[in-house]
Image: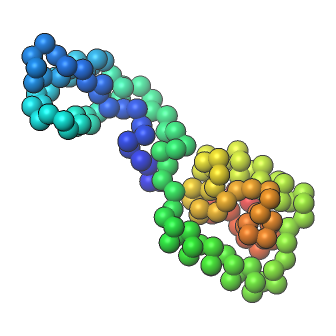
Amino acid sequence: MDINMDLLDIFCEFKPDTNKDTYICKLCNNRMVYASMGEDLPKIPCIKKLSKPIEIPKQAIKKPRIFKKIANFIKALFSHVLSGAKRTSLEERTQRLNICTACEYYDGIACTQCGCPITRYQQYLSKLDWKDQKCPVGKW
């Protein structure tokens, strides 16, 4: 699983110390000398924050890039057409939708594993509606 580390809250929270070139972390008292003006402070993992279990927010999971999404869609489309383009029933589509929206890889719009949109409205352009398609992590 690729994770966007910038969205995790594990880094020191520096504030200026009494010495103008020194910064100190509010939590772990980690000190650092940083004389470069106008640049962001480097990100250093905070010992206090790392001593607690880390929760990975859904926004931190990286989505497939646009070319990967296109490739996944074309592959799914060809498979769907070659298998007879059968559609799921309303009940099966609703069941798949419920599984997807409860999944840890659902970001509120799409699946972060394959990039497919998760919606009940795009019936002809959604893997939820295509009977031959499978969940990329095997949930349906």
**Residue drawn at x 75%, y 84% as measured from the top left:** 81
Q: Quadrant of residue 119?
A: bottom right
Left or right: 135, with 53 as reference point = right
Residue 61 location in percent, x, y? 49, 49
> Image height check: is 134 above or below 5?
below
Relative placement, left or right, of 55 versus 130 is: left
- Image point (85%, 72%), residue name: 87
Q: How many marks?
A: 0
Q: Residue furthest top?
A: 18
Residue pictured at 55% horizontal, 43% vertical: 58
Residue 1 versus residue 43: which sits nearer the camera?
43
**Outermost residue, bottom direction?**
82
Task: Tell me which corner region of the image, top left, top right, bottom left or bottom right, holds residue 27.
Answer: top left
Does residue 78 appear left or right of residue 132 in this picture? Answer: left
Residue at the image position 22 percent from the left and 34 percent from the top: 41
Q: Is residue 15 above or below residue 74?
A: above
| Residue 90: image location, x then y, percent | 90, 60
Image height of 9 relative to 29, above or below: below
Q: Which residue is at the front of the view, 92 or 16?
A: 16
Structure colour scheme: rainbow
Query: Is residue 107 in view from this perspective?
Result: yes
Which corner quadrant holds the C terminus?
bottom right
Task: Name which quarter of the figure residue 96 lies in.
Answer: bottom right
Residue 47 is at least partly visible in this image: no
Q: Position of residue 122 (x, y in %)?
A: 77, 63
Counting from the top left corner in percent of width and height, residue 97 is at 77, 53
